[in-house]
Amino acid sequence: MQLLRTSDAGFEAEFERIVRDRRESDADVARDVAAILGEVRERGDAALADYSLRFDGHSLSSDDDWMVSAEACKAAYDALDPELRDALELAAERIRAYHASQLPEDRDYTDGIGMRLGARWSPVEAAGLYVPGGRAAYPSSLLMNAIPAKVAGVERLVVVTPTPKGQTNPLVLAAAHIAGVDEIWRVGGAQAVGALAYGTERIAKVDVITGPGNAWVAEAKRQLYGVVGIDMVAGPSEILVIADKDNNPDWIAADLLSQAEHDPTSQSILITDDEPLARDVCAAIDRALDTLPTASTARASWDAHGLIVVVDNLGEAPALSDRLAAEHAELMVADPQALFDKLRHAGSVFLGRHTPEAVGDYIAGPNHVLPTGRRARFASGLSVLDFMKRTSFIDASDAALAAIGPAAVRLAEAEGLPAHALSISVRLNR
């Protein structure tokens, strides 16, 4: 963990170094992913079988080895502890309600010259969801990706998930049943992303790919953008907590560790105007790490990427926060709305001392698939719009074309495109 004070002489240079530290895949990963995608494009199912055996120890020899049936998902759902099943259903209900409110409205109107204009929204035909199955196997992630797609109206929803040694996570299967997933393929890694994008003998290609994964999955999505749509290139998890002196250090420590336990490359940052609180939070983190089952991962993350910034006053915090543009920002202050009003860049913001980031991961309703690596400066979290597209339309009457057509002709001629001009002028009897 590193502690910086904004009053220190070297603060600016050190903080800028941290801002620029992407903690993401290197050139070797990009090279390896390009090779894997090339193999999948050329060899299809054969490449998937080779990689699954090599990376996951899973042989794709029969239909059951390739796919998880709807019956297996229903059985996993039925076998859940009732309280856990109710928790998943509640999460799904809240996620569905929140995302239903995002559905955009079509536009259809006639302007002053009599030209009909508008736009129509429609879902993509097929979407692919990557669901981690190695270090992270999260049913919450499946719900957060699948439910917006279903709300958008996607007809075919396909999940790919690695199954090490052939083992599937029953919670993920139960979540797939709740969300109404159409296909689940037992393949993972960059090769699975390639299969969704290019299609293979067994797996039909999709239009959009979403969902988190490791560095190879993220790099595969990056390389395939344009072949398919993607939600975002996801990097390591991030949390920024802005806290005043009137906080429980144990609460803040738990919030910082909630992201640190994801991966050794995750980043947890505290900004506070109270150095005694900063010291108390450090002590609370040490105590928590003594008992946390995920302590090994969380400690590696905190030691390598943890940061505490002590400011002279919290008025400095919004500018620092916007430079970080963190995936998650918690505002643990007396007046969180006033601070929120000054923030521009964050994936999702959690207001007040009783709003831990983890409630957003599971059950609040907004999506937990969020931009990382400072991409919150220009990107948003996953929504129904990631599974939809807008088609504009124009319907010109004779009078409407007569009103604006001559100007269009002049512009086309000025650009040296005579056929453009002709296609309008012939309709104007010129």
Image: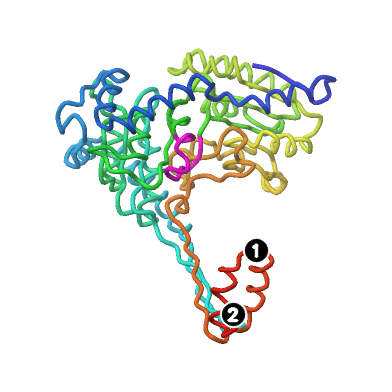
Residue drawn at point x = 52 percent, y = 30 percent: 235
Q: In which quarter of the image is the N terminus?
A: top right
| Residue receiving disc 1 | 416
Is 414 left, or right, of 210 in this rendering?
A: right
Q: In this view, does 378 lie above or below 311?
A: below
Residue 23 rendering spot, x and y as whole percentages: 57, 23
Q: Magenta span covers which residues?
A: 221-233
Residue 420 rendering spot, x and y as whole percentages: 57, 68
Tell me the amino acid under the disc marked 1. Gly
Residue 14 part of the magenta segment: no
Badge number at residue 243: none
| Residue receiving disc 2 | 111
Residue 332 rendering spot, x and y as whole percentages: 64, 37
Disc 2 or disc 1, which is closer to the eye? 1
- Marked residue nearer the N-terminal end (2 or 1): 2
Residue drawn at point x = 66 percent, y = 22 percent: 307
Numbered-mark total: 2
